[in-house]
Image: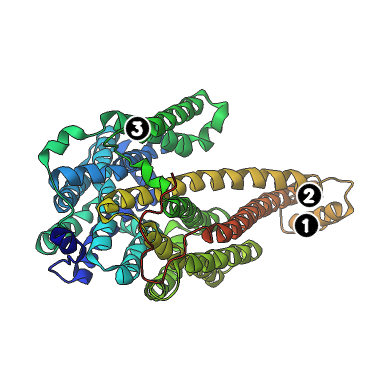
């Protein structure tokens, strides 16, 4: 009984905020690397003699290995301790970053990126678990605000930092900058972080790794990630290549669920989903990760493709959203101690719905830089209220010794949701653009008086400006009108996708009220499992 009381009253020797800042630094470094290389792919391909399609494996290889390692933290912590595992991940990530920077060819770079993803995959969930155990429950929301700032801000500023470094130095420096950050984080972890008494390391647990579960997870996530990353360029399931990886995902995931539910020491403790609150939190976090990552990709993509922004300028248009996030995140963290998690999540999703509807009506071809920045701001404001409240609620009613598995699963579903939504929204933009293009082309007929009049007027103007005779001017006019039609149809495609995100956010408001009632800043009673 005395040992149980000691465990419940345990507090780290160092200041919890110093610990939070330390692990957040390491997590920021890792999350940043999921997006910083995006804008450097053409430079990497050109320098290493690879095509654009081949260079995209720089992203895919990292994401696949990262996703596979995310749930393994619980087992690794039971073998060498959570603190030691966290330090090992920092070392692997930092060394792999250096190796990525000096890679002489694409195959070697891909191998180094896989190793880097293995190291990075343990940083996010362990950072979150360390924060959860370092703070008492009523202050945990404020700590998760710091983690949320890392998880949301890093992918937003990644393309901007990557573009600036690549333009002014070399793509290799997007990996070299991890070295001093990694060394500083390692030094601070050694000085400040310690394992709580319920984290018991036993080297004998090394032989208890669920190798079959890990293999099935590898098959499932490898199939899913490659299918999503390569689907659009290979015409999705019309391609045998994509169908193969789709089957890999279905078979691997089905086998994983069947095996993990029955295994004594699973690599992913799926029985945590018997807790209704945790299961709903995972669903909501998957959707949050989805809409967040989709929006982070959609807006700079729109600015570059339709408004002619450079990668750096497109990233700069996201900066105001990052500033808004820094301002709102602490307030959201404080709010978790004053309002029930499900109420905060519902408010956040409601703001999401309003924000995406506003974007769908204001994203136009004559949008200014200031307007683009404002649209990003209103998309970022709801994120802290959803992210922090759901993360906090995920631990409600669960044993403290399950924090490693909880953090691993919640980060796993968020990353999976992001990958799925990026691929799906990208495909929807293309499909809806083609739909609108087909409808608009129907109006480009000589029998249409408006089209005939516009062609005649523009053709006469171009002929008068030295574009040849009237017939040549009219031909040039039709080409210009068709180009405008393509741009307009693409803009309408983006508007449709933002409206879809709006309606999805409305559904998420209703889902938020499925969360268990809990007193603000306190956990619900344990044992809320669904049998």
Residue most extreme to the front: 1
Residue under label 1, please give it: 458
- In this rendering, position of residue 288 left or right of residue 366: left
Kindly state the secondary structure of the residue where label 1 is placed: helix
Coordinates of residue 119 in the picture (x, y in percent): 23, 45
* Protein image colouring: rainbow
Residue at 12% over, 68% down: 13
CA gap between label 3 and label 2 equals 72 Å
Q: Is residue 184 visible?
A: no
Upstream in sequence: badge 3 or badge 2: 3
Upstream in sequence: badge 1 or badge 2: 1
- In this rendering, position of residue 276 left or right of residue 25: right
| Figure quadrant of the C terminus | top left
Residue under label 2, please give it: 474
Q: Are marks 1 and 2 in contact (CB under 8 Å)?
A: yes
Residue under label 3, please give it: 262
The residue lying toward the viewer, choosing from 11 and 347, is 11
CA gap between label 1 and label 2 equals 7 Å
Kindly state the secondary structure of the residue where label 3 is placed: helix
Near mark 2 (Cα within 10 A), the count class, few <14, some 14-19 or many ≥20, is: many
Q: Nearer the viewer, mark 1 or mark 3?
A: 3
Upstream in sequence: badge 1 or badge 3: 3
Q: Is residue 291 visible?
A: yes
Classify 218 as above or below 333: above
Kindly state the secondary structure of the residue where label 2 is placed: helix
Quarter assignment of residue 318: bottom left
């Amino acid at each position: 009984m005395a040992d149980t009381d000691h465990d419940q009253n345990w507090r780290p020797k160092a200041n919890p905020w110093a610990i939070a800042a330390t692990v957040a630094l390491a997590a920021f470094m890792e999350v940043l690397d999921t997006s910083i290389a995006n804008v450097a792919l053409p430079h990497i391909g050109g320098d290493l003699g690879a095509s654009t399609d081949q260079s995209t494996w720089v992203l895919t290889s990292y994401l696949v290995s990262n996703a596979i390692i995310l749930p393994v933290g619980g087992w690794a912590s039971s073998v060498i301790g959570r603190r030691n595992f966290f330090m090992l991940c920092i070392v692997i990530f930092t060394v792999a970053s250096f190796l990525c920077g000096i890679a002489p060819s694409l195959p070697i770079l891909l191998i180094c990126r896989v190793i880097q993803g293995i190291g990075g995959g343990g940083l996010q969930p362990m950072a979150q678990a360390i924060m959860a155990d370092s703070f008492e429950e009523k202050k945990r929301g404020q700590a998760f605000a710091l983690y949320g700032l890392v998880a949301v801000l890093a992918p937003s500023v990644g393309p901007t930092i990557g573009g600036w470094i690549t333009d002014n130095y070399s793509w290799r420096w997007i990996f070299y900058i991890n070295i001093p950050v990694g060394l500083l984080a390692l030094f601070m972890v050694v000085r400040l972080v310690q394992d709580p008494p319920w984290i018991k390391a036993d080297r004998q647990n090394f032989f208890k790794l669920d190798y079959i579960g890990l293999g099935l997870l590898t098959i499932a996530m490898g199939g899913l990630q490659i299918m999503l990353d390569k689907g659009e360029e290979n015409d999705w399931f019309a391609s045998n290549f994509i169908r193969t990886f789709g089957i890999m995902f279905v078979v691997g995931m089905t086998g994983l669920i069947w095996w993990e539910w029955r295994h004594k020491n699973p690599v992913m403790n799926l029985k945590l989903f018997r807790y209704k609150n945790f299961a709903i939190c995972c669903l909501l976090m998957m959707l949050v990760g989805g809409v967040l990552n989709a929006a982070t990709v959609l807006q700079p993509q729109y600015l570059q493709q339709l408004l002619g922004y450079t990668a750096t300028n497109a990233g700069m248009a996201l900066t105001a959203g990052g500033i808004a996030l820094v301002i709102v995140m602490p307030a959201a963290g404080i709010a978790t101690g004053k309002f029930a998690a499900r109420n905060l999540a519902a408010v956040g999703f409601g703001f999401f719905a309003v924000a995406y509807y506003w974007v769908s009506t204001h994203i136009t071809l004559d949008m200014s830089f200031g307007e683009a920045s404002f649209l990003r701001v209103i998309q970022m404001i709801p994120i802290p209220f959803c992210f922090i409240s759901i993360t906090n609620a995920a631990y409600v009613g669960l044993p403290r010794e399950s924090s490693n598995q909880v953090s691993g699963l919640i980060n796993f579903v968020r990353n999976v949701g992001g990958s799925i939504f990026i691929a799906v929204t990208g495909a929807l933009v293309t499909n809806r653009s083609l739909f609108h293009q087909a409808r608009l082309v129907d109006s480009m007929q000589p029998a249409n008086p408006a089209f005939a009049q516009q062609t005649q007027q523009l053709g006469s103007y171009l002929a008068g400006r030295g574009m040849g005779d009237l017939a040549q001017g009219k031909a040039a006019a039709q080409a210009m009108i068709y180009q405008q039609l393509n741009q307009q149809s693409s803009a309408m495609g983006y508007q449709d996708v933002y409206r879809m995100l709006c309606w999805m956010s409305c559904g998420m408001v209703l889902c938020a009220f499925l969360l268990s009632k809990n007193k603000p800043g306190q956990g619900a009673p344990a044992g809320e499992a669904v049998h």
